[in-house]
Image: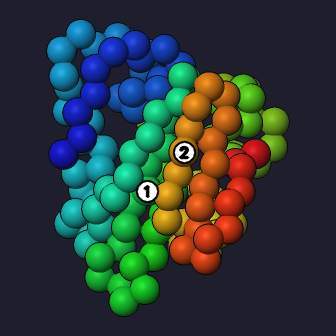
């Protein structure tokens, strides 16, 4: 289970709105993932956005899916086009440029990056 607390500005907590939480609150949007054989393997937070990797435990190659949410105004979520609205809930990044081979993620300020299972590093943009 994933719990969050703090500033909800830009929807970066993933609850669907921009409310602050002073007490730890359960983010249950990924709870359903376990029922289909997936689990959260990593979660990171930038100043105004968050990212999570979900790992498919039922596939032999352990394919991964990247979810993003929060402020998108600086393209740090890797969404296509000119996105200016906040993403208030976790959103699967499509198309999957890494073909399920994303292994690690990083986030800071207004940028994000990913490392693949092949060791390639790329910035989300």
Above or below 9: residue 53: below
* Residue 99 shown left or right of residue 36 in the figure: right
From the image, tell me which residue sits under label 1: 53
> Which type of secondary structure does the marked residue at label 1 adopt?
strand
Image quadrant in which you'd find residue 26: top left
Furthest toward the right, the residue is: 82
Mark 1 neighbour class, 10 Å CA radius: few under 14, some 14 to 19, many 20 or more: many
Residue 82 - label = none
Residue at 28 percent of width and 28 percent of height: 4
Image quadrant in which you'd find residue 13: top left
Along the line of sight, the residue nearer the viewer: 17 or 61: 61
Residue 106 - label = 2
Cβ–Cβ under 8 Å for marks 2 and 1: no
Report if residue 87 is visible in the image: no
* Residue 3 shown left or right of residue 44 in the figure: left
Can you say which quadrant of the picture contains the N terminus?
Answer: top left
Along the line of sight, the residue nearer the viewer: 36 or 49: 49
Residue 67 placement (x, y as % from top left): 49, 50
* Residue 22 shown left or right of residue 115 in the figure: left
Which colouring convention does the figure follow? rainbow
Residue 57 placement (x, y as % from top left): 29, 76
Report if residue 106 is visible in the image: yes
Above or below 57: residue 92: above
> Which type of secondary structure does the marked residue at label 2 adopt?
strand
Which circle, 2 or 1, is nearer the viewer?
2
Along the line of sight, the residue nearer the viewer: 113 or 76: 113
Residue 86 placement (x, y as % from top left): 60, 26
Residue 78 placement (x, y as % from top left): 68, 46
């Amino acid at each position: 289970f994933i719990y969050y607390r703090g500033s909800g500005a830009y929807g970066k907590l993933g609850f669907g709105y921009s409310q602050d939480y002073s007490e730890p609150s359960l983010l249950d949007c990924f709870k359903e993932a376990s029922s289909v054989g997936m689990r959260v393997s990593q979660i990171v937070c930038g100043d105004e956005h968050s990212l999570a990797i979900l790992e498919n435990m039922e596939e032999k190659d352990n394919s991964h899916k990247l979810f993003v949410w929060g402020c998108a105004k600086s393209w740090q979520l890797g969404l296509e086009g000119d996105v200016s609205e906040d993403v208030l809930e976790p959103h699967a990044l499509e198309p999957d440029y890494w073909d399920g081979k994303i292994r690690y993620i990083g986030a800071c300020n207004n940028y994000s990056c990913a490392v693949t299972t092949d060791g390639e590093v790329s910035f989300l943009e």
